[in-house]
Each structure stands twice: as structure tokens, then as C-alpha cells.
Amino acid sequence: MSPSRILRSHLIVAITLSYISGIVISHGFPQYDHHSLTLITFALLLLFSACRRITAAHLLLLPLFLQIGLYAGSEAQNPPTSLTHIFNNLNNQEEFLVVGKVKHLFSFNGEVTRFDVDPILIRTATSEYQSSHGTIRYAIKERLPSSILPGKTIAVRAKLQEPQRFMTPGSFDYPAYLANQNIYVTGYVSSLLHVVVVHNSTSFSEALRYFPELLRERINRAIDAGLSGEPAAVYKALLTGDRSAISPSTLELFKNAGVLHILAISGMHMSLLGVFLFTIFFWLLRRSEWLIFRINTKKTAAILCIAPLLFYALIAGAKAPVLRSFIMSLIVILAICSGKKHSFVPLISCAALFLLILSPGYLFSPSFQLTFSAVMAIAAAVPLIFKINGRIKDALTRKWPITAVTWVVAAMGISLAATLGTAPLLIYHFNRISLVGVAANLIIEPLICLWSLNIGFIASAVLFIFPMAADFLFDIGGIGISLAVSATSLFKAIPNSSIYLPAPSILYIYLYYLSFLPFFLKEHYPARYHLPSLLLPAVALLFLAWPPGEVTKSLTKESTIAYLDVGHGSCTFIEMPGGRRLLIDGGAISSPAFNIGERVIAPYIFRRGIGRIDDIVITHPDSDHYNGLIFILRHFKVKTLWLSQKDYDAEGWNRLLLTAAEKNVTVKIPLSNTILHQNGDASLTVLTNTSTPSAITSNDNGLVLKYRHGSFSALFPGDISAKMEEHLVTDQLDLKANLLLATHHGSSTSNSELFVDKVRPDVMVVSSGNHGTFPAPSVLERCRRHHVAVLPIKTAGTVTVTTKKGEYHIDTLLSLD
């Protein structure tokens, strides 16, 4: 086949790949001016089309869509430019009174309510009302009253700001997540007294617009009335997309079993509903001979599915995964109705292209990547599954064993294909994969998707006609959910049923998928090469569990010191020459529901391709220095935990010690002037252990650490007070260092004149977040006098220092220009 014919037969695939490439490239060149080139390409396309140079026109479509992808990707990275958009009227120093419409059904997780408002009018204490638009996501630590429903006009008083995130590589990008929903402003409401309904009546158009959201609320109320606990929470997730009520423990059970995707409305749910509806419509249409002879009942049944599927997408919130699933279903229906044979790949390409035109940012969302990688993997595996089942049918003679065995083989094959197809992306985004996922899906998917979900569809349909029947159906469906949750508990009891792994590199992910190509193309080369074609996928899977960086770490010649952004707290990760990995502290001031170790520290370490930590050193027993380390101890292989003291009366500290004992981590208390580790001219030393029974606060019961690599050094004094700093200077300790981690987060009660003069650092790094006034003005003035540069992590992001042969280089995640 000639290249021109190949291009014509795969044109939509090539166009989609070109568009995706443009979006990816735009992230490297966000300010690249490509408009002139786009116009030239478009003009040439028109010219070749007019001259009927079809092949040339097709070829020009590729650079054209590349340019369109560049433009769309660049625009997606920019915030709104409209002067009346709420984003462009922010003033973080003032409260805003916003009058607007409640956009969606609010979510309440037992602690915090989140709700979206489309502003109509805004004002501050010093300004008049002015019109505005956009969407604001509010949070309040109370449940909103039932009178506040979608479509209601409310007034909300709160401070507004841009969405915030931890500026540590690998941590969740909350602003980007909201930007994909066109939300660029968040607000925290301090009291329910600051949320008031100001207008109850709605026009017919508004009632129609908010009807799906009100229906979601009605279904949720019906579920809560008939069920309680986890069955109710899971049912709401399946039918209306509201996962806020599912407890963290249940979410953990589903994650461990590798079936969390069942709780998110996706293509699987839409496909099941589509098959369910198509079966009903096709059966009804076939009851009439008059219709059979006058219409194509198969195509008509497919078309009739569109409206209910759209309705389900709307009551499920019409969020990105739901919209993506509906569009994919719609494209399949249209393909069926066209009457032509279609390859699966072009259909998926159409869906991807349409979604990315709507929102280019979807490309970088885990749900988008996982959905399409799973679908493509299943599509590639289906011919092989059919071939295996064909051989099974030839080998067996009785009908019922054939049906049972082929069903199990098909289910296992599809689950295995989806697991292999998504494995590197799952590990890259979540650093976790379930080893029981294939088996768990065989049990849990039928219980939820074939039992509970279909019964829930019927219950939702009859809710307004026969409420009692709906309650009964929800009860029956809830039994399936209860059995599924019990099944996840059984899988959780299996040792190592779910494992955490370091994130693979982007290059490795590409190579992983390429390694499977020879296996699927084996029909095109001699049989003697078929078995060796399995070698590449096997090696690719091996390197997922054992990253190359773990093999080559002993060859490392330089040091890397990373001061992580954990908010108000402290965490420093050090990679020494020879591959030794050390963590100095790991905690932050945060809510009990937010685990800084799970959400920030571990993702950073995993993103560097690291699964082992040799030493953890806790400078002193304050929770903002250790409360993320329980997660680290549980999910990384740690050799030694160094403490300033063991005896400390705090629940979190005791749980930390118990976790260390459970994981067989050696716990040691070093004396002053102890070298914790040394490799050549690099070492980490405890200059002093200041712990004494007479210490007034835990801050002065700590370890003062110094890291050296050649002539470079960095000092970690913990949270010691100015009085303790004076003792260190008096004791003539070797405090001189190039880098100083500011004592007590840059507090004015530490970082004394005497201490700063003795250390004489080139740079002081301050790990404080936005909690209080840190670094203190007096500390900044002191540093100015001593010509010490100050790097606050809250404005610089994670600070990374690379040292080699005595020289050092500092990089910050955010530009300080």
C-alpha cells in the first residue's frame, strides 16, 4: 500500500496525533507566535484542495492541526482575560460579597462542603456593586441547608483567591484540575451566616437549565432515605457522580483492589446503560411487524439510546469523564447508523480529538490518559481473546462449559489488557498498582455494574412514578454494593495485594508501549521470532518494578539537596554521592484529613524514580517536622530512623514509633559529633544533640545537623531558640555553612544576630508557608546586614541544590524575577 493510501485510510488518526503533538509542544513554548505560519498552511491547504491535489492537501492537514494544537494548548495555559471575569477583580486583602447562582449540587464529605457559584454582582467594603462572571468554588466547614439548591440566587461573603498548590514536583496540581473545569477562583466561607438565599423564584429557562442538577439532588435524597452508610455513598457515586460521602477507608479498599475506576462514572457505566437501553428498545421495536418492514430496527434502537444517555450524562454532573464517555458512546452509535464498517482506532481518535478541541487541558489529566490507554489496550487484545476462545470451543463439546469458560477467559483477558495498558500511567500518576486487580474485577464488577448499577438505573427511572418501588429497588441494589465492599476487604487481607512503586520517566512510558508492538505484529514475521517478541514486554514490566535508577545509583558522583514545599513545616531530601538517600524531617501544619507524607513528600520521591530511603532524621518531636513520616515508613523501605529522643508524650509520636517497629526499621538516638553516613568527601554529621530533661520546650530538644560535600556545607538547626543558638556558638561548634535552613521557620525568636554572624551563610532557605509572618521582618533585616540572600520556599517553591567538587548550584521551582 502506498504512503498516500495509508494516510487516507488513517487520516483521522494522523490528524489527532498532530493535534495532540501541538498541545504537548505548546507547554515547552507557551509564548511561541505561530499565527502567521498557521495562515500560510491554511492558504496552501485551500490552494491544493482547489487544484484537486488531494494527497498534498491531506499532508498539509497534519501541520495545520499541529499549529491548531499549539494555539489551543497555549490558550489553555492562560487565565481568563475578560476585565469583568471574577479572576481579574481579585484583591486578596479584602472580602467580597458575591451575588450569584448556585451552579451544581454541593458536595459534603462529613467535614467540608464545596459548592460552585456563578457570580452576577460583586462588591467589596470599599466599592460599589459591579457585574461579573466566571465560577467560584467555595468551601465551608459546615453542611449547607437544604434550601440552597442549584439555580438559587445566593449572596456569599468570603475572601477570594487563586487556587493554591504545594510547589513540590509530583504533588497534585489543584489549580490545573480546576482550570479544566473553567474555575480560576476559590473562596473560604467562615460561617453559614455569610451564605444567604436572596432570590427563590426562577424563570422557565433557568428551571430547564438547572433541572438535571435538581434531579441529581432528588435521586441523592431518595438514596439517603432508603439506604445508609457506604451502600448509599457508593450508589450516589454510581448514579449521580457524587463521591464526597464515600469514606476514606472504603476508597482505600477500592484502591487496594484496583477497582476504584468503578466508583467514577466512565465509559464502562455509559456502555452498560447503552447496552441495557439498546436491548430494551430493540426488543420493543421487534414486537411490531409493521415497524420491522418499514425501518431499520437496529439503527433506530441505537438512535433512541442517545437521549437517555445524554440525560444520564447531565444528571451525573456532565463532568469531563462523563462527557468523554457520552461522546465516545455517541460516536459508536453514529458509526453503527452509518452502515459502514469502521475500525475501532478511528472512532477512538474522533472522540479524543473532539474532547481535546473542547478542552486541550484534558490531555494531561490522569482520567483522560487512563481511559484511552485502557480502551486501546482492550481493542488490541480483543482479537487475541477471540482466538483463544475459538480454540476453547474447538476443545470442548458441551455448551455450558464452553459458555462459562469463554466468559471467564474474556473477562480476565479484558481486565489483564486494561491493567497492562494503564500500568505505567497508573504508577506515574498515583505510584501504586494492585496485584489482585484482575481477580478483583472478576468479582466486584459484576456485583456493582451488572447488579447494583442496572437496578439503580431502573430505580431512578421509576422514582417519580412509584417512589415505594424505587426504595425497594435501591435496597436490592444496595445488597450488591455491600457484597462488593466485603469482597474488597477480603482482597485487602492478602499480603502485598497493592504495592507502591517509583514513577517511570516519560521516555520509559513511550518505550513501554513500543515494547508491545512486536507482539501484536508477530503475524508479519517468521514463527521462530514469536517467543522472543515476548521478551521486550517482560523486560518493560521488570523495569516498572525495579527502576534503572535503583541499579545505577551507586555511580552517582554529586549531591542533591531538595528543600520541599510542605507549607509551614520542614522536609529536606538529600541524595548523597554513591546513592545514599536521606530525609531530614517530614511534616507540616495541616488538617487531619490531609496527609503531607502521602500528598506531597512521597509523590516527590516517587517522581524521582526512588523507592528506598536509607535514613530518616527527625530533628525534634514537633508534629510539623514528623507528621508525614508514618506514610513514608509504611510505603518506602527505610533502614534507620534517627531521633533526638524517644520519650515524648504525643499520640502522633507514639504512632510513628509503633510504625517503625512494625516495619522493622532500626531506631537510633545519636550522640553529639556522630557521623550518620559518610562516602568519600560527603558526610552528614550530628553536630550536637541538644536534648536534655531540663529543656523548656521540645524545640530545644533536637539535633543540629551539618551536611558536607567537599568545601560545600549546609546547616540544619531545627527549631532551636536564640538561647540555644548562643550555647552552640559558645561551644565553638563548626557552624560555618554555605546554606542555612532558617531556624524555627524564620521566626524572630531564633536566627539571632550572634548565630547568623557565626554561620555566615550565602543563602538562608525559609520553610514557612503562609502560616503567620515568616520570615520575620527582623530576620530579613539581619540577613540584609550580613549580605545573606533569603529564599522563602513559599515564593520560590521547592529549592534544589546540586553540589559537585565543592561547587554548588541552586534551582527554584518558581521564577523569582
Image: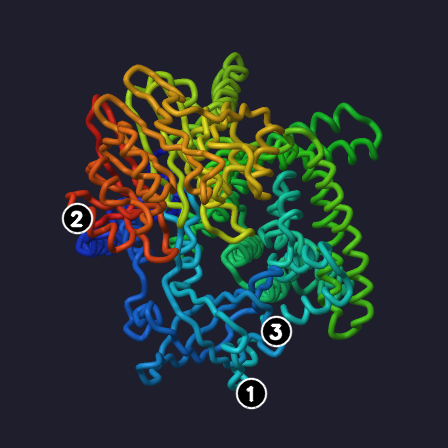
The residue singled out by tag 3 in the image is: 214
**Could you say which is closer to the camera, residue 694 or residue 419?**
694
Q: Are marks 1 and 2 in contact (CB under 8 Å)?
A: no
Q: Position of residue 435 (x, y in %)?
A: 62, 31
Q: Which mark is residue 201?
A: 1
In front of the other: 496 or 619:
619
Does residue 807 lie above or below 191 as drawn?
A: above
| Foreground of the two, 546 or 798 | 798
Look at the image and tell me in which quarter the N terminus lies: top left
How far is mark 1 from mark 2, CA to CA? 61 Å
How far apart are labels 3 and 1 at the CA level?
Answer: 14 Å
**88 lies left or right of 237:** left
Among the two numbered marks 1 and 2 on one chain, the one whose residue lies closer to the N terminus: 1
Q: Is residue 238 above or below residue 311?
A: above
Which residue is drawn at the image coordinates 37% and 52% (left, top)?
769
Q: Amino acid at mark 1?
A: Ser
Measured as percent of width and height from the top left, residue 492 is found at 69, 36
Percent x, y of residue 641: 50, 28
Would you name the residue on which mark 2 appears? 784
- Labels 2, 3: front one: 2
Res. 271 visible in picture: yes
**Residue lying at the far front of the rendered structure:** 694
